[in-house]
Amino acid sequence: MSTSTVDRPATEAPAPPAGVVAVVAHRKKTFGGGLDELRANLVAAGVGRLLWYEVPKSRKAPKKVRKALDKGAELVLVWGGDGMVQRCADTLAGSDVPMGILPAGTANLFATNLGIPADLPEAVRIALHGRRRELDLGRLNGEHFAVMAGAGFDGDLIRDADRKLKGRLGRIAYVWTGLRHVRGECVRTRITVDGADWFDGEASCVLFGNVGTITGGIPAFDDARPDDGALEIGVSTASGAVDWARTLGRMAAGRSEESPFVRITRGRKVTVRFAEPKTYELDGGARGTAKKLKVKTVPGALTVCCPDPAE
C-alpha cells in the first residue's frame, strides 16, 4: 500500500539561539563527548539562557519538562533514547515548543527515522538551526507515542528484553527474547478502525506505527510517515515457533505485507478489545496490561527540529 503525502509546511529555523534553551538529559546515557561536551557546544553557539536538568530514569523527565516550560523554555533538547523522547514528547504535545533530539540511547528509532545522526555536534546544530516540523503523535489510552505502540507478543517481548543484551545485539536481542514467547497463545481480538469493524478473530500481536522502522530496527510499515495524519495498524495471527520465525524474517527483510500471518491497514482512530488482559508498550517501554486499547493519531502534535531536506 503506497500513499503519497505532502509534508506540512516547516516553520523557519530561528536565527542564532538567543532565547531560553532547556536540556533534559538521562544522565546514564552516553553520546559523543558526553554532557560536558554538550554544554560547551551550547555555550559556544551563543545560547542566551540555559536551563539544565538531569534525571536518572526516563519516567522522571516529564516533571523536568514541565518545569522548563514554566520557566519560559523556547526549545527543549532531549538527551536519551526512545523511552526518554517518548516521555518528553508526551509532555510537550500541543505546547508548540520545539523538541531537539540528541540520540544518546541504545534505541534511537525516532531520531533515525527523522535523519538525525549519531554525531553530537551535528545533532546540536540541527536542534538549534534545523527546520521545525510539525509531526504527528499517536495516543494510546491517553499517553502519546512517537514511534510505535503494541500489545500481546510485542508487549511481552518489550517487557522481558534484557537491556544489556539489547545494547549489545540490537534487533537480534528482540528476536532472541521474542522466540521465548512463541508459546504465548493467541487471544480473541476485535479491532475497529475509524468506526468500522476490521478484525475479529484469534491474534497474538497488535501494532500501531507512526514511522516505518520500529522495535529492534525492523522495517515493519513501509508507508508510515509521521506527518500524514494517520497510523499504520498491524495484526498478527502467528502462534508458534515456525509461524513467528517466518513472520519476523519477513519483517526484518522489509516485507511485512507478504506474511500470511500479518494484516496491515491505515486509520486515525482505533479500538482494540481483547478477551483477556494483554501487556502493552509505547516506544519500547512496557506499561502493564489492559483488555481495551483506545488509539488515535494526533496530527501536528509535536514540533521537532529536523535536518533540512537537502541533507
Image (cartoon, grey):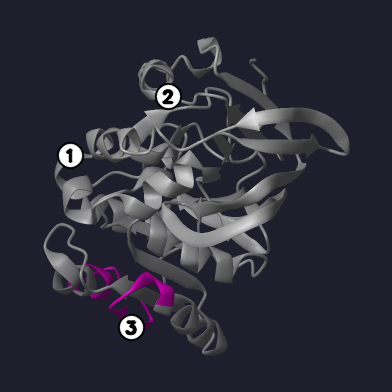
Q: Residue furthest right?
A: 195
In the displayed structure, 249 sits above or below 297; it is above
* Image coordinates for residue 113, horizontal then vertical, percent: 43, 38
Disc 3 versus disc 2: distance between alpha carbons?
49 Å
Magenta highlight range: 40-59
Which of the pair 251/80 is nearer the observer? 251
Would you say residue 51 sits in the magenta stretch? yes
Judged by depth in the image, the label closer to the viewer, 3 or 1, is: 1
| Marking on residue 52 | 3
Looking at the image, can residue 18 be seen?
no
Judged by depth in the image, the label closer to the viewer, 1 or 2, is: 2
Mark 3 touches mark 2? (CB < 8 Å): no
For marks 3 and 1, the one nearer the N-term is: 3
Where is mark 2, residue-wise? Answer: 240
Disc 1 versus disc 2: distance between alpha carbons?
23 Å
* Image coordinates for residue 87, horizontal then vertical, percent: 48, 67
How dense is the environment of label 2, judged by Cα within 10 Å: few (below 14), some, or many (20 and up)?
Answer: some
* Image coordinates for residue 111, horizontal then vertical, percent: 39, 46
Picture quadrant where residue 159 is located:
bottom left
For marks 1 and 2, the one nearer the N-term is: 1
Kind of residue indicated by mark 2: Gly
Where is mark 1, residue-wise? Answer: 169
Q: Secondary structure at mark 3?
A: strand
Kind of residue indicated by mark 1: Leu
Which of the pair 95/309 is nearer the observer? 95
Disc 3 versus disc 1: distance between alpha carbons?
32 Å
